[in-house]
Structure formats: structure tokens, C-alpha cells
């Protein structure tokens, strides 16, 4: 829209306003400032009487304005200064806000996390803890030991028989005993097991072995060095015990020890 067009629209509005004013009585309390402008710029729209009223009313307004105390005006100016910041401060603040936008931290909702479940890893158990409890000494074995006046009855081991245990060529029962399982031996017997003959071979202990039928065999209890560990075995006459009892591979042989007048003896029982 051009400037001339805007002026034309304004003139039309003024003309319409004055057409209404011709029929309506003069009201100085309504748009008085606007009426003063029209009276100066277009006095033809008012009668002489109306122009006189407008002039007198404008003089009264001017007088009332002059009566306002100067300190009141200064106070209003001071209050305005307090309420408002200088333009350069406003522009600077606006520039700062434009160059340094306020950043707000985005608060993410907390995720519900499942409680950690720690998987219990079973501890490695040694063979001793996994071993079955010792079998109960059969009544007939107990009575036989009592008959022989045997004392210090101890459970030694349960042994699953392998092919080497019943081989008559080897003629020995391998007894894989640990150091803490040798409580049935006396200190002197342990020292004897460590002794060697003139051929650097273990001497061993002479013991009595009772088979499941309580037949007595004289055998030798020896300590052998196999690879990196020590093993114990019953040798001499073992093949006769195997042959007489018909021991087979896979059978479980239970072994107990006892003493008759301090003489070490073993008794065998098949599960």
C-alpha cells in the first residue's frame, strides 16, 4: 500500500467521523485531543460556538497541567529510570542472550534396572570332600577282629579293582593313599617304609591280610615312587588272594586296619 493510499483511507475515516459529529452534540470529554487536532486542521467541521468551547477547554487543561508540582514530575522520571535500563544495556543483554543462549540440562527419566543377580559359581571341591562316607564295618568282620583280640580298628579306603589289581603277573594291590590318610601307621612304621635295602629297593612292612573269608595271608606293605607321587601297595601272595576269591574288574574292595599285639593287619571286604 502506498503513502497516498494510506492518506486517502485516513481522510475517509475523518470524514465519516465528522459526518457523525454533525448530528451528535459536542462532547469534550470524548477524544478531546483528537477534537483539538481537527479544530486546528479542519475547523470547517465545527460551528463557531463549538470552536470557542474547544479553545476554552484546551486552555483549562493547559492550566491544570501547569499546576502539577515539579518534584512529582522528577519523581516519576526517577522511578522510570529505576524501572527501566538504558538502551545500550538492553541491547547488550539482548545480544548476550542471542550469542549465549541459555542451555537447559535435559533430564532423562531414570531407567528401571533389574537388580543384579550374581551367579553363584560352585567352588571346586577336592576329592576328599567329594568322597563317600566310610562304609559301616560289617558285623561278621567286627566279630572276627574281636575274636582275634584286635584293637585300633581304622577304615583305610574303598578301591575299585582295575585290571592291574587282579593281574597275577604283577601280583599287587595298588593303594593310592595320601599323607594325611596314613594315621593307621606308627612313626616307626613310617620310617621303616622309607628304608631301602642294598639294591636300593624299599624294604616294606610285613603285615597279615584277611580276605573276605577271613583266610590269612602274609604280605608286604611297601611305599613306591611313581612319577611325581608316592603310592602304597600290598605285594607277595596277593595273587593267591585274587585267585582264592575270584576278584573281578570293577568290584569295590573295602579295606580296614587293626592291630593284634601291635602287629599291623588288614581285613578285606567286597561290597
Image: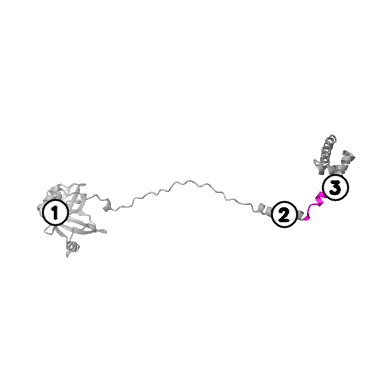
Say if residue 170 shows up in the picture: no
Q: Which residue, given by chain and number where applicable, does mark 2 sit on?
A: 79
Disc 3 packing (10 Å; few <14; some 14–19; many ≥20): few
Q: Earlier in the sequence, mark 1 or mark 2?
A: 2
Disc 2 packing (10 Å; few <14; some 14–19; many ≥20): few
Looking at this rendering, what residue extends furthest in the bottom direction?
A: 198
Q: CA distance from mark 1 to mark 2?
A: 122 Å
Viewed as shown, does residue 187 lie left or right of 7? left
The segment highlighted magenta reads 57-70
Q: Which residue, given by chain and number where applicable, does mark 3 sit on?
A: 59
Of the pair 250 and 262, the residue shown nearer to us:
262
Looking at this rendering, what residue extends furthest in the top direction?
A: 23
Q: Which residue, given by chain and number where applicable, does mark 1 sit on?
A: 209
The quarter in which the N terminus is drawn is top right
> Do residues under tags 2 and 3 come within 8 Å of each other at their CB atoms?
no
**Secondary structure beneath label 1:** strand
Amino acid at each position: 500500500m502506498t503513502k497516498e493510499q494510506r492518506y486517502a483511507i485516513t481522510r475517509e475515516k475523518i470524514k465519516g467521523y465528522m459526518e457523525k459529529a454533525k448530528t451528535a452534540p459536542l462532547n469534550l470529554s470524548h477524544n478531546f485531543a483528537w477534537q483539538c487536532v481537527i479544530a486546528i486542521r479542519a475547523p470547517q467541521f465545527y460551528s463557531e460556538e463549538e470552536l470557542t468551547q474547544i479553545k476554552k477547554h484546551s486552555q483549562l487543561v493547559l492550566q491544570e497541567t501547569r499546576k502539577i508540582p515539579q518534584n512529582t514530575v522528577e519523581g516519576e522520571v526517577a522511578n522510570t529510570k529505576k524501572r527501566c535500563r538504558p538502551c545500550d544495556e538492553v541491547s547488550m543483554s539482548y545480544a548476550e542472550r542471542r550469542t549465549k543462549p541459555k542451555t537447559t540440562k535435559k533430564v532423562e527419566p531414570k531407567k528401571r534396572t533389574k537388580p543384579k543377580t550374581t551367579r553363584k559359581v560352585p567352588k571346586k571341591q577336592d576329592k576328599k570332600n567329594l568322597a563317600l562316607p566310610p562304609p559301616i564295618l560289617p558285623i561278621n568282620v567286627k566279630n572276627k577282629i574281636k575274636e582275634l583280640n584286635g584293637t585300633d580298628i581304622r577304615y583305610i579306603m574303598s578301591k575299585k579293582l582295575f585290571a592291574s589289581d587282579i593281574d597275577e603277573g604283577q601280583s599287587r594291590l595298588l593303594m593310592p593313599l595320601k599323607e594325611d590318610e596314613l594315621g593307621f601307621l606308627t612313626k616307626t612304621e613310617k620310617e621303616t617304609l622309607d628304608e631301602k635295602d642294598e639294591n636300593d629297593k624299599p624294604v616294606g612292612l610285613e603285615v597279615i591280610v584277611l580276605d573276605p573269608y577271613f583266610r590269612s595271608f602274609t604280605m608286604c606293605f611297601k611305599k613306591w615312587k611313581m612319577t611325581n607321587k608316592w603310592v602304597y601297595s600290598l605285594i607277595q601272595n596277593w595273587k593267591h588272594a585274587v585267585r582264592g576269591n575270584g576278584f573281578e574288574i570293577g568290584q569295590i574292595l573295602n579295606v580296614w586296619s587293626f592291630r593284634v599285639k601291635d602287629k599291623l593287619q588288614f581285613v578285606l571286604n567286597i561290597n
